[in-house]
């Protein structure tokens, strides 16, 4: 059967594709609860990593069978996804039996359903430097039939810079969430680069944001389980869908800071940096492109 890749369109000023806005009204009317935890990220910034971390911190001890019986995507539903013949992310979230409910979204700030703000929900915002995000996103679009065709690397990079990718501009997305912290203190930013450098320290910070006390032994277990090589081997932590062809590119691809250097030419890097300077003017938001 011929596969028709989705196309991009403008959705209230943000480039989107069908699977992520088809269920718009339902998503907008989602009823968040005060103890929900929302993992809000731009795609390819370490979302799955942090979702798994949170799931283990909350339920690793109390509900160990969940780890072997339920795929991570069902434990931490993707709020806005709506694929044919599958339960929507919203349905999965509504059905979650846990407290708290862990819910992930890639929505830019302005699209987040209002009940999350009304219920004062805690939000973990994962961030990753733009160059590595672009590379990871490119490979993800290559291997995922559910994403628009990325074209070749230089075409994709140009589109990424112009925000012509699903979920729109990385710059707008990241700036929007970062600014929101000023008025909504229940956002905990986690940088991918910090996680790579010192996972244990970042787990400690996450626990203190969530008011969780976990023994050193428990935290060590979580740290071990979320290591790249262990997650790569863990079938339950990897998405399983015929839409993704892991022979083209694995989901757990490299898990490194600085892979952009293997993709960007010098000219591309300079052009990217020029454009970046114009769009990322908040000096309090600094990313590392190498560690
Ligand atoms: P790469 O493509 O650069 O390898 P998301 O979950 O938001 O889609 O992000 C996917 C990216 O996070 C991929 O980056 C993936 O390899 C990386 N990743 C996932 N789990 C990781 C882990 N445990 N350690 C390091 N990187 C991880």
Image (tube, rainbow, N blue to C red):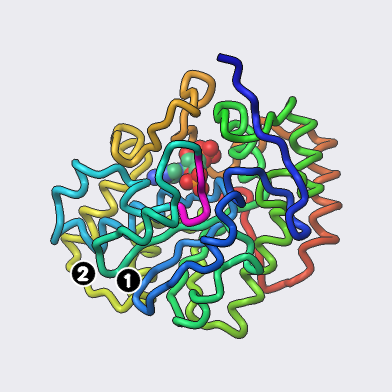
- Callout 2 secondary element: loop
**Position of 154 compared to 239: left or right?**
right
Return the residue nearer the eye: 84 or 113.
84
Q: Which residues are magenta?
A: 78-83
The x, y position of residue 5, in whole percent, is 65, 28
The answer to which image quadrant residue 261 occupies is top right
Do tag 1 and tag 2 residues touch (Cβ < 8 Å)? yes
> Relative to 206, does residue 257 appear above or below in the rendering?
above
On residue 176, the disc is none
Is residue 10 inside the magenta stretch? no
Which of the 4 quarters of the picture holds residue 13? Answer: bottom right
- The image quarter containing residue 278 is bottom right
Q: Position of residue 79 (x, y in %)?
A: 47, 56
- Please report the residue visible at 41 percent of the width from the left and 49 percent of the height from the top: 49
11 shown above or below 31: above
* Sequence-first disc among 1 and 2: 1
Instruction: Tell me the residue at 65%/62% (across/down).
Output: 174
Disc 1 secondary structure class: helix
| 82 magenta-colored | yes
Which residue is under mark 2? 214
The residue that label 1 is drawn on is 207
Q: Check the picture and name the quadrant holding the N terminus.
A: top right
Q: Residue furthest bottom?
A: 183
Rendered view: 234 above or below 42: above
Q: In the image, what residue occupies the spot 57% across and 33% down?
A: 146
Report the predominant secondary structure element of the magenta stretch.
Answer: loop
């Amino acid at each position: 059967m011929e596969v028709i890749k989705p196309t991009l369109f403008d959705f209230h000023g943000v480039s989107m594709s069908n699977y992520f806005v088809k269920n718009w009204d339902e998503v907008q009317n989602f009823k968040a609860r005060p103890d929900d935890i929302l993992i809000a990220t731009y795609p390819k910034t370490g979302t799955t990593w942090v979702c798994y971390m949170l799931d283990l911190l909350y339920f690793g001890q109390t509900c160990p069978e969940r780890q072997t019986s339920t795929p991570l995507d069902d434990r931490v539903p993707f709020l806005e996804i709506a694929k044919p013949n599958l339960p929507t992310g919203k349905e999965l979230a509504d059905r979650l039996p846990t407290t708290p409910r862990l819910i992930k979204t890639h929505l830019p700030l302005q699209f987040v359903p209002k009940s999350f703000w009304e219920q004062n929900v805690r939000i973990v915002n994962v961030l990753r430097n733009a160059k590595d995000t672009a590379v990871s996103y490119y490979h993800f679009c290559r291997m995922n039939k559910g994403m628009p065709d990325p074209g070749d690397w230089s075409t994709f990079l140009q589109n990424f810079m112009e925000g012509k990718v699903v979920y729109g501009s990385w710059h707008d997305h990241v700036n929007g969430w970062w600014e929101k912290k000023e008025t909504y203190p229940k956002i905990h930013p986690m940088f991918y680069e910090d996680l790579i450098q010192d996972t244990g320290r970042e787990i400690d910070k996450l626990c203190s944001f969530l008011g969780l006390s976990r023994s050193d032994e428990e935290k060590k277990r979580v740290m071990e389980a979320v290591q790249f090589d262990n997650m790569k081997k863990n079938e339950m932590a990897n998405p399983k869908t015929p839409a993704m062809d892991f022979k083209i590119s694995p989901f757990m691809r490299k898990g490194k800071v600085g892979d952009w250097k293997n993709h960007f030419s010098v000219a591309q890097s300079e052009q990217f940096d020029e454009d970046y300077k114009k769009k990322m003017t908040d000096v309090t938001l600094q990313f590392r492109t190498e560690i």
